Amino acid sequence: MRRTLYSLSSILLLCAAGHAAAQAAPEGTLAGVGVGYVPEYTGADDNHLVALPIFDHSFGNGFYASTRRGLGYQTSAAGFGLSAALGYGGRRDEHARNFGAGSDDLRGMGKVHGGALALLTATYQLGTIGLSLGTAQALTERDNGSTYTIGASTPFYRGPRDQWSFNTSAVYGDNKHAQTYYGVTAGQSARSGYGSYRAESGFETIAVGVDWNHAIDARWSVSSAAGLTRLVGDAADSPLTRRKTTPSVTTGLIYKF
């Protein structure tokens, strides 16, 4: 999947089931609930459990509504795909949260407010390999900045009930995004005790993961994912980064209408 998308808020959009839904985008509805064991924030020293709502409905005319993909429209032809959607993400608190990104290690850093995002994605199917290029552009909380993601995925096992796939992605953040999530201003330094730090634009994370989808019957399925995210560049060198490599595991029970 991914995550991506926009620090930990991306994980809250959906678990591995959302990845499968976004790839296949079948007409109909997927709904369910999942749980994730994920970092408290990108680079956090600790993981925590979060609930993951699962919903994805694709209309016959290309429009869709999804907890992962947002509200948008997609089209495809000759192996190419394009989608445009409105989503939400970016929130991070300066204390631990049961749902979302936040940690007591961030006390004094202040809250990062979530905002509306324009999600634009282009895909290309090259044999069994799915390639993607996307961006999340901040529409409301402009200081949160924008990110650009390149990714690839491919199945390596397909059986009557099970499908395994491998995926990898890299996220590039602009100056505003880097400073908001990895930088420390003079004011934040005085309140938090972290040293001042200026984070510049560049690649922030590289991720690899494995997805497993298991069909229980024609309507019920379980979708799971496990992965590692490695912080790089200024994100890795940030005083907020307690771990440069963080694991995550998600699983969800899905019903297809």
Image (cartoon, helix red, strand yellow):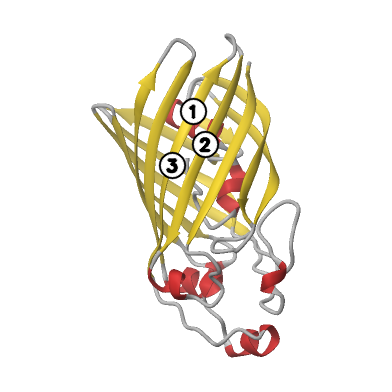
Task: Give the mark nearest the N terminus, 1 or 2.
Answer: 1
Dot 1: element: strand
The percent position of residue 7, horizontal first and vertical second, equals 54, 58
Task: Give the mark nearest the N terminus, 3 or 2.
Answer: 3
Task: Say which amino acid is labelled 1.
Answer: Trp
Q: Looking at the picture, tell me which residue is in the foreground, 244 or 86.
A: 244
Contact between marks 3 and 2 (CB within 8 A): the answer is yes
Q: CA distance from mark 1 to mark 3?
A: 10 Å
Q: Any mark on residue 225, and which? A: 2
Contact between marks 1 and 3 (CB within 8 A): the answer is no
Q: Where is mark 3, residue-wise?
A: 209
Task: Say how many tags the image has.
Answer: 3
Q: Residues within 10 Å of mark 3 (few under 14, many from 20)?
A: many
Contact between marks 1 and 2 (CB within 8 A): the answer is yes
Residue at left 38%, top 35%?
166
The percent position of residue 184, horizontal first and vertical second, equals 56, 81
Q: Where is mark 1, residue-wise?
A: 212
